[in-house]
Every structure is written in C-alpha cells, then in structure tokens.
C-alpha cells in the first residue's frame, strides 16, 4: 500500500495514499470539485480545465483531476479567483455549443447543462457565440453523432480506441473547432455499434438512434398486435432513470408498465436466453463428442462482438456458435410457433425488444437469418434509456406501480437465462446445461465462480466426465486480443488453451450496455450483484429445466440442432472489410440509414 500523504484543503487536514490526485483528496472529505472531461473509468486528460484549484505558493491554477498531491500541500477549491476561472472556461465551451437544449436528447441528463447551473452561468455569455463547423452523422442504424455538441473531452475517442480497440472515432480540426467524429463516417467506419461512446459522452454529441416513435405508432394502431420482451439487465438498470438506487430490480413493475403502455402480450427475453442455451450447449456437446478439432466454441449473443469478429478476426468464424441471440430467437418463435398456436397472422405482430444494447438495432437487420419467420423477426429495438422515455411520455409512475406478471409461455425463465445480463453469465448458463447433457448427471454446484467478477479476462476450469474443460471470459473488446492470441498460438503448436470462450463487447457485459442509463463501472457492479441475488430466488436455475422450453421442443422444434431448430434458431457469419459499410451483409438496405451528403 502506498504511504500516506498529508495535505490541507480549505483548512481541513486530509491524509490520502501517495499518487492520489487533488480531486481524490477533496472527495474524501466531502468537497465537490466540478468536472466535465473527467470520468473515473477513463484515463485523465484535463482538457476542459473546469476543475481548477488554487495551490498555495504556485502562480498558476492547477487541474484537480491531473495534479498529484504532495506532502504539506495547501489547496483552495472555491476562492473567488478559482470560481471566476471556472466560469470563464465554461463560457468559452458554451460559446461554440448549440443552444437547443430543450430538444436535445440529453436534456435533463447533460453534464454540461448541470455544470452551467452549478456554476451559476445564467446571464448572457461574455463571449461571441459561434458554432463550430462540426456536422451531423446519422449514417448508422444504431448511433448518431452531432459533432457541434462535442466539447473535445475525448472520452469517446479514448473508450473506442483504448478500451474497445475499435478505433472508429478520432479528433478532427484544432483549437475552438476541434470535435470528435467517425472516420470517414459511422456507416463506413470500423464502428461495431457497442454504444460505449454514448455511455461516456457528457453531452448530446453521440447518442443512440431513436426508435420510440415506431413503438408509439404500433401501439396506436388497432390492427397491430404489439408484443414486448425485456432483456435480463434492463430490469436492474431501468429504475435508475426514476430515482431508484443502482441495482434495484423492478421486473414485475416493468411488466405492469408495459401493459399500461398498451402492449398486448408481455414476454421476457430470459426465455429466449434459455432457448439459446439449449442450442449453444448442444453445439458444445457435439464438438466435445465428435468435433474436438473445432474447439474452442465462442459465444455469439453479443451483436457488437459479432460485428467486431466479422471485421477484425474473421479467421475465427468457424469457432463461433451459430446460435442466434436470445431476443432474435424469441422473435422468430413468436412469429412462428406462437402465432400458429394463437391463429394470429405473423404480419400483424409487432415485436418490440427492450435491450441494454445499441448494437441490437443493427442486429435485427444483420442478415437474412433475422427474417427466418418470413417477415422481420424483431421489428424494433429500443434501449433502456428509450424505454424510460416512453414510460415518462405516458405519464406512468413506475416506482409506485403494483407488480405484474409476464404472459406464458414466453414469460417463464430460469436463473440461467437471467444471468445472461452479466459478464460470464452466458458461459455459466451453458456449462450448467452442457454438463448434464454430457454426463446425464445433475450438476450440484451450479455457481461457477471462476467466470464471475469484473476482471477484464477470467480463466477457469470445470471438470466434465473426468475431463478438465478450460474456459475463458472477456468483457470489453480490448480484452479479447489476449484470449484470441492464445488460441492462435495454440493452433500453431497444436495445443488447445480453451474449450469454451465467452465475449461481451461492453465492460461488465450487458449490465454495462451502450443503451443503459449512464453510469460507470461501480454502478455496473451493483447491477450485476442484483442479477445474481434475484437468480438465486428462482425456482429452477438451469435452462433445460424450464418446462415451457421442454414443451416448445416437444411440440415444435424437435431436438436442438435438428432441422427445425437449425432453420429458425441459427445464423451464419461473413468476413467483412473494415470500411466497407454494413450493406455488405444486410439484405434489406432500404431499412438502413443512407449516408447524407
């Protein structure tokens, strides 16, 4: 542990480990220093100069986020000189920033807006107002960039290049004209639509493509049967948009809210997760018994990871599970099996997926396999943030709603389906079922601790049929290279480092998806904890124990990996150039946003 440094802030003595910043020291004693470019999850840049403080004996003001504490340092955080400098720097930022706050997607949830209130910037700006030359990029089906609202904090560039290792974003121009944008645009860039840039943008410069109006149109059409499904991690994050503490699970209130919105049938993506496990675990068993040369098996429930793989490492396509993601499986089951049982024309069904993910907006159009029912299997995907906006627009008091229930058969799920929302969850769920498929014995200790936690890469072993199965889990795309390099080296040496690999594009897994309420890793860990706590209370915790999953295979699908299941529940992948544009695989180009000149 680092030795303690003693200093004084605003007359208060504070001791803090060596190497800490002034910002850290101030937080320890409850002093709030305003910040804008700073984020605890990211590398400190100190570009906005909002967190200036005065240090005794120094001529110039210093940034609290970048200045390391020294023994005996005396600091003043809110002197007249400091406050004046902060306001001037903020006004300089605002002098080139749009003033359309009322219609901005981040209105009410914007750090720049909050800072203007906090620093008392209410009168006319003292600097001439001139917007920078930045432009709008709405070429992606998932994300949008309004670079005029960029404050050059570089958070998005850092998360894209250093954490995700995608390098789709860069800084352009200089001085007051500097802004972040995609190169050459989102549609033709290496962007994998993970949306982590939106999670960390403090303003409305990068945000999700809005699809709430499509949902309202469907709800207001008396001829349309609207069906909803919610992803595992939505239930432990949505409450944050309504003032509830992070990690509050409100599954049953969400069901009630959906009915009040006018949804006709309320299903749950967790059922689709159970279905995914049936197919994916069966793939693992098949390789274990007959195709060991095709190990490792790599999970594919994350569309941003699929997009990344197709662009950056297509040599691993044969290792990819061909199982569709849970919401796509549920979508096609609703428009085939369920529609036939209910005698409802599939053309009248409008499936709404409520996801933590911005990449899901692309996935529903990714290739022909997303139209396996004969129509589009999932009609629209909205993020957790969009769902919150729908609820607020409808005047629904979510926090005080009574509990509701989902509809059968697709509203019943196992604990294995629920933990899909956390990094390592897909791996754990699949191993619970694969173990019993191979051994025909019950797995008693179903908590597979080696794949849990928030380490960037997790490695472990589980014994199945007297053989050690080596597994690896990565979350955050920047952590994938370590695992894939080991696999590539193993192939060269004819060695197998892993049998099974899970990858989730977003740090933390789906609890940290690009469409979740804004919050860093600390909040994501609270969401993950809530999922595990809820999972322990469910009556069955293995996907193959779900009675409605068993009924679905008996009545309609036959067996996993057989003809019907292969036709409806599986997909294929394509090697794609980094800058080719997503039309390379999408069969319905008219549904994609085209580049605007």
Image (spheres, rainbow, N blue to C red):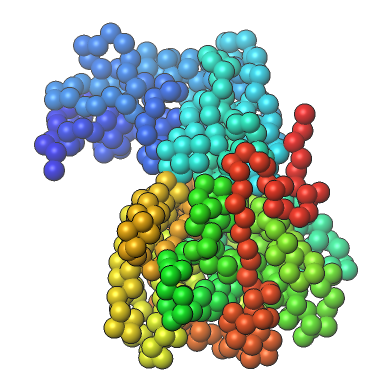
Q: Quadrant of residue 132?
A: top right
The image shows residue 329 at horizontal and vertical percentages of 64, 71
Residue most extreme to the front: 493
> Can residue 387 be seen by looking at this rendering?
no
The C terminus - image quarter: top right
Q: Which of 447 and 288 is in front in this view?
A: 288
Q: Nearer the viewer, residue 83 or 456?
A: 456
80 up-or-down from 460: above or below: above
Q: Which of 236 and 375 is in front in this view?
A: 375
Residue at the image position 53 percent from the left and 29 percent from the top: 170
Residue at the image position 69 percent from the left and 31 percent from the top: 136
Residue at the image position 56 percent from the left and 73 percent from the top: 276
Residue most extreme to the right: 223
> Can residue 491 be seen by looking at this rendering?
yes
Q: Quadrant of residue 65?
A: top left
The image shows residue 402 at horizontal and vertical percentages of 60, 72
The image shows residue 448 at horizontal and vertical percentages of 34, 72
Q: Nearer the viewer, residue 375 or 129?
A: 375
Residue at the image position 66 percent from the left and 19 percent from the top: 133
The image shows residue 399 at horizontal and vertical percentages of 56, 62
The N terminus - image quarter: top left
147 up-or-down from 451: above or below: above
185 up-or-down from 498: above or below: above
């Amino acid at each position: 542990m680092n030795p303690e440094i003693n200093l004084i802030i605003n007359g208060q003595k504070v001791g803090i480990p060596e190497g800490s910043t002034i910002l850290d020291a101030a937080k320890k004693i409850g002093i709030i220093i305003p910040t804008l470019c700073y984020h605890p999850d990211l590398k400190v840049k100190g570009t906005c100069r909002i967190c200036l403080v005065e240090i005794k004996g120094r001529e110039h003001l210093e940034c609290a986020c970048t200045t390391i504490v020294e023994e005996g340092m005396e600091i003043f955080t809110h002197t007249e000189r400091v406050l004046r400098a902060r306001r001037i720097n903020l006004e300089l930022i605002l002098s080139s920033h749009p003033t359309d706050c009322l219609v901005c997607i981040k209105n009410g949830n914007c750090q720049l807006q909050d800072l203007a209130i906090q620093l008392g910037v209410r009168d006319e700006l003292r600097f001439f107002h001139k917007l920078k030359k930045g432009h709008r990029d709405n070429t992606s089906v998932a994300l949008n960039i309004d670079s005029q609202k960029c404050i050059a904090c570089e958070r998005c560039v850092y998360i894209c290049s250093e954490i995700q290792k995608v390098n789709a974003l860069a800084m352009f121009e200089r001085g007051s004209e500097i802004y972040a944008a995609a190169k050459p645009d989102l549609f033709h860039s290496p962007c994998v639509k993970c949306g982590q840039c939106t999670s960390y943008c403090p303003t409305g410069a990068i945000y999700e493509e809005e699809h709430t109006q499509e949902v309202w149109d469907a709800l207001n059409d008396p001829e349309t049967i609207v069906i909803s499904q919610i992803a595992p991690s939505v239930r432990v994050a949505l409450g944050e948009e309504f003032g509830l503490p992070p990690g509050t699970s409100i599954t049953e209130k969400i069901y009630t809210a959906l009915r009040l919105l006018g949804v006709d049938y309320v299903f749950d993506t967790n059922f689709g997760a159970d279905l995914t496990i049936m197919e994916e675990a069966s793939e693992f068993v098949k390789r274990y018994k007959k195709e060991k040369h095709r190990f490792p098996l790599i999970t594919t429930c994350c569309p941003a990871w699929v997009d990344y793989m197709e662009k950056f490492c297509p040599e691993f396509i044969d290792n990819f599970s061909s199982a569709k993601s849970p919401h796509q499986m549920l979508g096609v089951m609703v428009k085939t099996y369920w529609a036939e049982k209910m005698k409802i024309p599939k053309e009248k069904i409008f499936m709404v997926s409520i996801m933590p993910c911005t990449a899901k907006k692309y996935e529903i159009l990714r290739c022909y396999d997303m139209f396996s029912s004969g129509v589009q299997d999932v009609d629209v995907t909205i993020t957790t943030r969009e769902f919150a906006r729908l609820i607020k627009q409808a005047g629904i008091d979510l926090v005080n709603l009574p509990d509701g229930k989902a509809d059968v058969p697709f509203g019943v799920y196992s604990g294995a389906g629920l933990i899909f929302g956390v990094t390592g969850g897909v791996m754990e769920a699949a191993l619970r079922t694969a173990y019993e498929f191979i051994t025909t014995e019950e797995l008693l200790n179903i908590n597979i601790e080696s794949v849990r936690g928030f380490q960037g890469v997790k490695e472990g072993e589980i014994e199945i049929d007297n053989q050690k199965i080596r597994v690896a889990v990565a979350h955050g795309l920047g952590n994938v290279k370590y695992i894939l390099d080991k696999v590539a080296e193993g192939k060269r040496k004819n060695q197998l480092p892993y049998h099974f690999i899970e990858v989730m594009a977003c740090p933390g897994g789906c609890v940290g998806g690009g469409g979740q309420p804004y919050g860093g890793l600390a909040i994501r860990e609270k969401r993950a904890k809530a999922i595990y706590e809820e999972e322990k209370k469910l009556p069955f915790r293995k996907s193959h124990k779900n009675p409605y999953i068993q009924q679905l295979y008996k009545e309609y699908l036959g067996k996993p990996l057989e003809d019907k299941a292969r036709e409806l529940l599986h997909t294929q992948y394509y090697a794609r150039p980094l800058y080719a544009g997503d039309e390379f695989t999408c069969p319905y180009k008219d549904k994609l946003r085209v580049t605007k000149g």
